[in-house]
Image: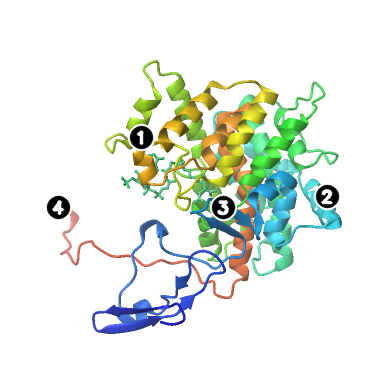
């Protein structure tokens, strides 16, 4: 078709599929009439070839290895913005002016406290509970205090919910960590900015003054920005899926947190450090032996932190993080043997035909865990940090989906390959 659409010949059907033009990247064809006209559906496990939405939030150029949020390059945002500034950009579509940013930061301080009744909520978990389980459960628990803001069609309620989620998540995360240590919870402070407040709640003790290291605060600020949004990844698509039933924002975000937890997604940052530690502690280990294992189809071992559904080039976030890792390590704790192992693995993989043929490069998770570790965070908190960073991206996508007149409840079709009909046999005859 001359509008960039397609003509589909299927059996004795000929179907004109109209174009869905993109501003940048892949154009689409609208298959909305396919099943009604041909009784046939498309089949695309993992949706590698299927767009689920039109979006103005984030663009990823997988070939060039570029990432922009609302048209701004990730490098500019990471180098020049605060995390809350980027969160504002994702949610409202423009960078805030000074007054807007001050009000936005003030609202984050205003809403950072948790209702005291929630303290008992943390007591219900065992000491060794994974903080991602606490984070997603607490997100639903928090929603029970704000049912008046659950209406997804009320713009003011959506913003109220968004502010509370972004403001309270660091408090929940820090208290989940304190719970695992047996030390007392530390309350947020209104004289501290967002990242400093989080570090204070994480590492302060009531027995002594705690001074936030500006180097660590700056590093964490960049890390959260690099995780803020990334198109229709597994967890963001989950947030949209759940929100499409008109479930409230808290419930949708809690679902996204659970999707993020998987080691193929946000859980990869923990899996990378576990992999590097395994190699460091394996006296027979060599870079070559682990690269060979990653290539061996009979070996379940994968090079965690490598590969990406969209990037067939270096993930720009990994590029920033790799440079950053050396700077942070120099400043906070000196060398880390795991970083050297990571760099050796990267060098070996990038020169190996198996990885080259499949365009497998380091992704955001390959270096992030090493930096989180250098900043003093325990490994089981890494995916929680990813979730705090991704929260504004999830909310921005949920808001865009809710406001999109084309949105319908997400309900994919299937290709049924099971039994046709079977005669029922009562239990006493089986
Ligand atoms: C994130 O989507 C996003 O944007 C996600 C994210 C975000 O910001 O939200 O960027 C964050 O989740 C990053 C990815 C973190 N996960 C990992 O690092 C886990 C390790 N990587 C993979 O398992 C894999 O690369 C995925 C999950 C990231 C992508 O999976 P795909 O697109 O389904 O690719 P695939 O599994 O089909 O792999 C294609 C080929 C296969 O080999 P062949 O069957 O062609 O022979 O590449 C191989 C795979 O075996 N392969 C790997 C590999 N990743 C892919 N082989 C060894 N080690 C790896 N890491």
First along the sequence among labels 4 and 2: 2
Applied colour scheme: rainbow
N-term mark: 4 or 1: 1
Q: Mark 3 points at which residue?
A: 66
User: What's the mark number on residue 294?
Assistant: 1
Q: Quadrant of the N terminus?
A: bottom left
Q: Residues within 10 Å of mark 4 (few under 14, many from 20)?
A: few
Q: Residue at x 48, y 25 (%)?
A: 341
Q: Which residue is drawn at 31% across and 84% down?
A: 14
Q: Are marks 2 and 1 in contact (CB under 8 Å)?
A: no
Q: What element carries label 4?
A: loop
Q: Is the residue marked 1 within 8 Å of ligand 1, measured from its CB? A: yes
Q: Residue furthest top?
A: 283
Name which quarter of the figure residue 160 lies in.
bottom right
Front residue of 183/265: it is: 265
Give percent across and percent down for residue 109: 80, 46
Which numbered marker is on residue 185? none
Q: Residue 106 carries which label?
A: 2
Is the residue 342 above or below the residue 355 in the image? above
Q: Which of marks 2 and 1 is nearer the N terminus?
A: 2
Q: How far apart are marks 3 and 2 (CA)?
A: 33 Å
């Amino acid at each position: 078709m001359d509008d960039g659409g397609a003509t589909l010949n299927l059996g004795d059907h000929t179907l004109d599929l109209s174009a869905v033009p993109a501003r940048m990247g892949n154009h689409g064809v609208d298959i909305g009439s396919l099943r009604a006209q041909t009784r046939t559906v498309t089949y695309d496990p993992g949706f590698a070839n299927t767009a689920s939405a039109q979006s103005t939030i984030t663009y990823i150029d997988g070939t060039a290895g570029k990432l922009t949020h609302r048209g701004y390059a990730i490098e500019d945002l990471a180098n020049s913005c605060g995390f809350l500034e980027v969160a504002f950009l994702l949610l409202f579509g423009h960078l805030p002016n000074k007054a807007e940013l001050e009000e936005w930061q003030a609202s984050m301080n205003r809403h950072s406290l948790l209702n005291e009744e929630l303290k008992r909520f943390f007591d219900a978990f065992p000491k060794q509970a994974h903080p991602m389980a606490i984070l997603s459960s607490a997100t639903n628990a928090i929603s029970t205090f704000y049912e008046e803001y659950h209406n997804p069609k009320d713009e003011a309620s959506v913003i109220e919910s968004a502010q509370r989620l972004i403001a309270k998540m660091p408090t929940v995360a820090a208290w989940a960590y304190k719970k695992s240590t047996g030390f007392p919870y530390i309350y947020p402070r209104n004289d501290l900015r967002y990242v400093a407040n989080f570090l204070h709640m994480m590492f302060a003790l009531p027995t002594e003054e705690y001074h936030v290291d500006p180097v660590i605060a700056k590093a964490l600020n960049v890390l959260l920005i690099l995780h803020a949004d990334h198109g229709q990844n597994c967890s963001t698509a989950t947030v949209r899926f759940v929100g499409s039933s008109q479930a409230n924002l808290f419930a949708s975000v809690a679902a996204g947190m659970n999707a993020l937890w998987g080691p193929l997604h946000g859980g990869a940052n923990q899996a990378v450090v576990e992999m590097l530690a395994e190699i460091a502690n394996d006296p027979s280990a060599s870079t070559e032996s682990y690269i060979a294992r990653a290539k061996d189809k009979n070996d379940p071992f994968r090079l965690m932190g490598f590969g990406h559904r969209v990037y067939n080039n270096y993930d720009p976030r990994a590029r920033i993080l790799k440079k950053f890792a050396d700077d942070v390590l120099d400043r906070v704790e000196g060398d880390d043997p795991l970083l050297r192992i990571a760099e050796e693995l990267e060098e070996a993989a990038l020169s190996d035909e198996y990885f080259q043929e499949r365009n497998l490069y380091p992704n955001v998770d390959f270096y992030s865990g090493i930096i989180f570790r250098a900043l003093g965070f325990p490994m089981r908190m890494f995916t929680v940090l990813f979730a705090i960073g991704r929260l504004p991206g999830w909310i921005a996508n949920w808001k865009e989906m809710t406001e999109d007149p084309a949105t319908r409840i997400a309900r994919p079709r299937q290709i049924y390959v099971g039994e046709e009909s079977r005669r029922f046999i009562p239990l006493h005859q089986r």
